[in-house]
Image: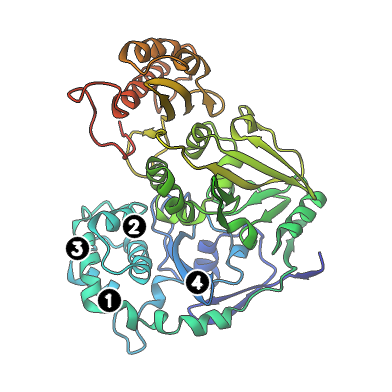
Amino acid sequence: MAVTRNVIRFLLAGQPQEVAGIDPTMTVLDWLRLEKMLHGTKEGCAEGDCGACTVVVGRRDGSAIRYEAINACIRFMPTLDGCHLLTVEHLRRPDGSLHPVQQAMVDCHGSQCGFCTPGFVMSLFALYLNEARPSDDRVRDALAGNLCRCTGYAPIIAAARRMYALGERATDDLVVTAEDLSTRLGLPEESETLLLEKDGRRFIAPATSDGLAEALIEHPQATLVSGATDAGLWVTKALRQFDATLYLGRIAELRTIAETAVALEIGGGVTFSAAEPALTRLYPDFGELLRRIGGVQVRNAGTLGGNIGNGSPIGDSPPALIAVGATLTLRLGDARRTMPIEDYFIAYGKQDRRPGEFIETITVPKPTHGAEFRAYKISKRFDQDISALCGAFLVELADGVVSRIRIAFGGMAGTPKRAAGAEAALLGKEWTLANVTAAMAVLRGDFTPLSDWRASADYRLTVAANLLMKFFLETGGASADLRLVGRGRVAHA
């Protein structure tokens, strides 16, 4: 590492901050409340679910700044390096008047007990900065990561409509001064690595992929962190301490999406929010699946590579990636290797990632002409819920005969897994009700799921087989009077 720095530098409401000597995994929420005495940001769940801790973070995006809502309760302080942090205390105008977002909440009676209100305000503020006159569906999506026990949400949605009438985005102070703030944030030196250490524990944030590869050779057992949507809970809930934390969020190469004639090359550090538009264009159901991964705050932080890398059997993106035939490129030092994504998952808690190796890119092939893809997430709650099971299906037909079939499930085994028997029962057969019904019976033998509080084993087996039938019906496999409606949307039980 040619250049290192041991001080976190960022802006807090436009004021430069330099922070050193803190615990490497101190959360932004704790720093705001305990060190800066900014108590508007609340702790409700300490796991990124309730949204009471929502703050807005700006980050360089070309010559301007992109502002996003994030959960302060699971975000580590060193990840703010080079960013602009705003809390509810910073929205009031210089003359003392309320920001249009705050005034709209007052006018529409959007607050009762008030505990969740700062988080709602900040989620609406991020929406206000980034979108002009969003649809009601978009407003509801932006607020899905914020929970309220009092108002029933209708007054808050009304406030979202009113805030644009109280002030124009183009004249907002942050929009007007964005270019100046972007200049003040500056850019880290190309080879500079942020290195913080306290009580023998380290936080290492390289600026390049080469720096990350080098750091992982030196610290092969380090905990890799990008959005910390998993690792943050290990700290706040399990009270774990990491000897070494390697942060990927400053590495521009890992945040790129490149398109070729045949595929999307998605960097391992691309967030769900950034990946969603590109994947939606190729596979609409894939984009809809990503939209249901947590609230906006989680999707702004969590990454596709992280969702794959932790190997969870109930991660939502792996079944879809398996079904479309995605591949992974892993890097160890200067060496790279590529594998089908299903080969990455070996057993529960075990993945084919060697010490010192990291996911560099995810390659998602473009659909061939006539290919049909669907993804179905089954959960107890539509938004912000973990899957009981998640199924993804891709079929290609030649004169009504299955020439290619890929069926993958999460939540049915110790890893995301293909339904090999059901695929074999359909390949080369006509896409008919009788053949699909037979494959449904075979599919029940492909998995031995567990029973837990989300679903019983029998429920999972029954629903998985029924999803295959749903896929068949949605892809023109039966007469119109049997065909299901709502194609292009992710199913919900």
Tell me how far mark 2 sits from mark 1, CA to CA: 17 Å
- Of marks 2 and 1, which one's residue comes earlier in the chain? 1
- Any mark on residue 64, and which? none
Give the percent coordinates (x, y) of residue 241: 67, 49
In front: mark 4 or mark 2? 2
Q: Dot 3: what SS?
A: helix
Give the percent coordinates (x, y) of residue 296: 40, 55
Residue 37 visible to the viewer: no
| Amino acid type, mark 1 | Pro
- Of marks 3 and 2, which one's residue comes earlier in the chain? 2
Tell me how far mark 4 sits from mark 2, CA to CA: 19 Å
Q: Nearer the viewer, residue 448 or 149?
A: 448
Q: Dot 2: what SS?
A: helix
Q: Residues within 10 Å of mark 2 (few under 14, many from 20)?
A: many
Give the percent coordinates (x, y) of residue 485: 23, 33
Quarter of the figure with residue 188? bottom right
Q: State left or right for residue 188 relative to residue 364.
A: right
Tell me how far mark 4 sits from mark 1, CA to CA: 19 Å
What residue is disc 4 on?
85
What residue is disc 2 on?
142
| Amino acid type, mark 3 | Ala
Give the percent coordinates (x, y) of residue 8: 65, 71
Q: Dot 1: what SS?
A: helix
- Of marks 4 and 2, which one's residue comes earlier in the chain? 4
What residue is disc 3 on?
158
Q: Nearer the viewer, residue 47 or 112?
A: 47
- Of marks 4 and 3, which one's residue comes earlier in the chain? 4
- Of marks 1 and 3, which one's residue comes earlier in the chain? 1
- Any mark on residue 100, and which? 1
- Of marks 4 and 1, which one's residue comes earlier in the chain? 4
Q: Nearer the viewer, residue 93 or 35?
A: 93
Tell me how far mark 1 sits from mark 3, CA to CA: 13 Å
